[in-house]
Image (cartoon, grey):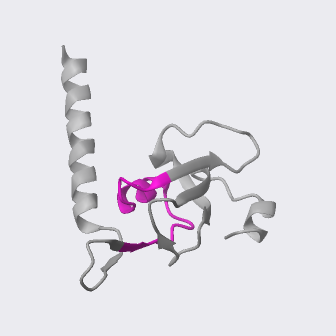
Amino acid sequence: MRRAAAVGAGALLALAAVAVTSAEERPETATGAGDDTEKRTVPDFLGLGLWRVFTRLDRRTRLDVHDVSGRDRRVLWPSRWQVCTQYPEAGADLDRRTTVMIGVVRRGETCPPRVRTARR
């Protein structure tokens, strides 16, 4: 019974952390004059943790996350990965058709040289 309570408390703390982070860091937006459409831009994620990508992008944004280390690992725990590449570049406009592509490596690893030179 203690394990279930500890797991439940951990999940509650994780949800609270997400709520606080989401409230502090909203996606960068600028609304058009007289429009109901919202203009959104891509933040700069290079060097940040993958968790920041999930908390800063709007939930409607399409996201493609992949391991760029060459090991083709599955990205399961966002807090254990850091961003090496992103496309489109920071400051680019986002619309419903845009897919943000993020290349990551495990925390503590360095971005491969072929990826660092081709950074977007």
Q: Which residue is rendered at x = 43% and y = 53% of the image? A: 51
Q: Residue at (24%, 83%) from the top-left corner?
A: 34
- 53 displayed left or right of 101: left
Q: Answer with left or right where residue 28 lies relative to residue 87.
A: left
- Measuring 57% from the left and 51% from the top, which residue is drawn there? 107
Q: Residue 51 or 63: which is nearer the viewer?
A: 63
Which segment is the magenta one?
Answer: 39-62
Point out residue 76 in the picture as x, y percentages from the top left corner. Answer: 51, 37
Residue 71 location (% of width, % of height): 74, 40
Q: Is residue 110 magenta?
A: no
To which quarter of the image does residue 113 belong?
A: bottom right
Residue depicted at 25% across the width and 51% down the height: 17
The reply, left or right, for residue 46 in relation to residue 21 is right
Question: Does residue 72 sit above or below 63 in this rendering?
Answer: above
Left or right: residue 64 versus residue 26 is right
Q: Residue furthest bottom?
A: 33
- On the image, the x and y values in percent for residue 105 come to 63, 51
| Location of the N terminus (image quadrant) | top left
Residue toward you, 60 or 74: 60
Q: Quadrant of residue 6?
A: top left
Q: Could you tell me residue 93's position as x and y percent?
A: 48, 74
Residue in the foreground of this view, choosing between 53 and 3: 53
Q: Quadrant of the C terminus?
A: bottom right
Relative vertical location of residue 88 with respect to residue 109 in this rendering, above or below: below
